[in-house]
Amino acid sequence: MNAASRGLDPVQASALREAAARVAASPALAKSHRLAVLFNHLVEALIEGRADTLKEFSIAADVFGRDASFDPKTDSTVRTQTLRLRERLELYYAREGAADPIRIWLAKGSYVLRHEPRTESIAGPASLE
């Protein structure tokens, strides 16, 4: 079993939820209900260890209410919204999230969120004494 299928430990889950809440409340995401729902769905899938199961069809059904007749060849909703989410996350971390302790991103070609702690100093390198 790989790490993604086990989910995050409680400390990581709590930190990721806090980081995700900041992103979701930001101007980059707050004005788009669809993007916020998609983002929260992807965050919870990662936390719960379901990220490996994320597929275009399941996202279409779970997030956007599509039924069994959903055809990704003719309906690009999931791909379009994922692209918009990726762009909004980049915008958030370039602006108001620049100092956040955790960065969350969505790699191209994937529906699985990635996250990492930021270890670099916000103020820049320490001065030598």
Image (cartoon, rainbow, N blue to C red):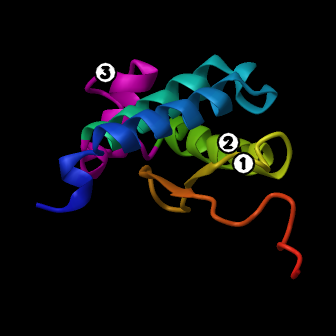
What residue do we see at 59% from left, 25% from top?
36
Eyeballing the image, is 30 above or below 56? above
Q: Which residue is mark 1?
A: 87
Q: Which residue is mark 2?
A: 84
CA neighbours of label 2 inside 10 A, class few (<14), some (14 to 19), many (20+):
some
User: Which kind of residue does numbered mark 1 sit on?
Assistant: Glu
What residue do we see at 31% from left, 37% from top?
10
What residue do we see at 63% from left, 59% from top?
118
**Taking the image as drawn, is residue 16 in sight?**
yes
Q: Nearer the viewer, residue 53 or 92?
A: 92
In the rendered structure, the answer to whether residue 124 lies left or right of residue 63 reads right
User: Which kind of residue does numbered mark 2 sit on?
Assistant: Arg
Residue extending furthest left? 1
Residue 62 in picture, x, y percent from top left: 34, 24
Q: Which residue is mark 3?
A: 67
Residue extending furthest bottom? 128
**Mark 1 and mark 2: Cα distance apart in space:** 5 Å
In the rendered image, residue 68 lying in the magenta stretch gets the answer yes
